[in-house]
Image (tube, rainbow, N blue to C red):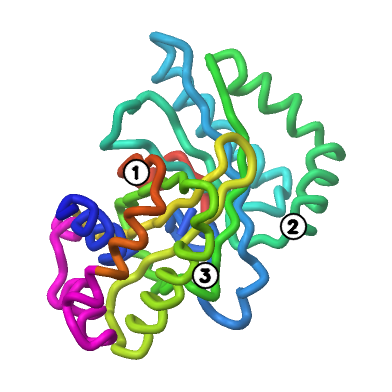
Amino acid sequence: MKRCYRSILLVLVACLLAASLASPTLAAGKTGKSMADHDVATIWLFWPKQGQGKAFVEALKKHVAWRKSAGDPFAWKVYTPVAGSDLDFYVVRSGHHTWADMDTEDAWGQKTEAGKQFMQDVGVHIRKMQHIFGVADTKLSHWIDSKDYRFFRDDRYQFKPGHGADVKDVMKQVHAAVTRQHWPHSFEFEYHVGGTRGMSIIMPMKNWAGMAEPSPNLMQVMTRALGSKKAAEKLFHKWSMAVKTDTTTVYEYREDLSTPM
């Protein structure tokens, strides 16, 4: 049980994807009225062929430069895992979009034959790839933009059937408490569309020191909000009882591979 509480505390320490492409964050959306409907991110994952990692990187640099010169309406940011069970893949992501923006990108891609260009530039070096979308819950997230974020912790959850209301209740109460108490740390909730269904909680960090538990920590914030530590523990227990599986990955933002500014 202590492990479950600590996992939640660490994840919500300073967080989503999920990442916006307007700034180097992994989060898909951005809290704020003007961006509330720009909550969709399109995400590609690429695994290079064995022994072709360096060639893949050089090809990707070439291709993102081509996309910018060809007028791609999307900007793309690249992330690589630095913690987790699989470190041999690249995340290429564009966020802060509406679903209608995907039609605009598709139209540009067809006009410029971007798919064909990608396969010529990069495809020969790819062993496997996946495409998913991330949809941020901008109403319940607590995101603070910064250009200094370097790492992003991504805790992915699958929940047991019938526990959706409990999960949403915890999210609402946490959001209300951190907002009311002006907690100076960020987090974002992001739902997955495509592949295995689930939800991520994204935590941004400027450095590895950002992994440390903050003061006050979330348990203390919720204890103050709910009136007792017992009530806070009960709330987090509701979350832990809803979780079916959870995995954690930490990503590093790769400015050198992202769309040139």
Numbered disc 1: secondary structure: strand
Residue assigned mark 3: 30
Q: Give the range drawn in magenta.
A: 209-233
Question: Is 212 contained in the magenta span?
Answer: yes
Q: In this view, does 97 lie above or below 179?
A: above
Residue type for callout 3? Lys
Residue type for callout 2? Trp
Residue at the spot x=46%, y=48% of the render?
Answer: 159
| x, y percent for residue 53 | 41, 19
Residue at the spot x=39%, y=9% of the render?
Answer: 51
Residue at the spot x=74%, y=29% of the render?
Answer: 115
Labelled pair 3, 1 in contact (Cβ < 8 Å): no
Numbered disc 3: secondary structure: loop
Labelled pair 1, 2 in contact (Cβ < 8 Å): no
Q: Which mark is residue 17?
A: none
Q: In this view, does 258 lie above or below 149?
A: above
Q: Is residue 34 above or below residue 40?
A: below
Q: Residues within 10 Å of mark 3 (few under 14, many from 20)?
A: many
Q: Which mark is residue 251?
A: 1
Question: Is 175 contained in the magenta span?
Answer: no
Q: How far apart are marks 1 and 2 (CA)?
A: 25 Å
Residue at the spot x=47%, y=18% of the render?
Answer: 48
Quarter of image, res 86: top left
Is 190 on the left or on the right of 41, as rendered? left
Given residues 206 and 29, the one toward you in this image is 29
| x, y percent for residue 154 | 37, 49
Residue type for callout 1? Tyr
Q: Is the magenta stretch mostly helix, strand or loop?
A: helix
Residue assigned mark 2: 99
| x, y percent for residue 149 | 32, 60
Q: How far apart are marks 3 and 1 (CA)?
A: 19 Å
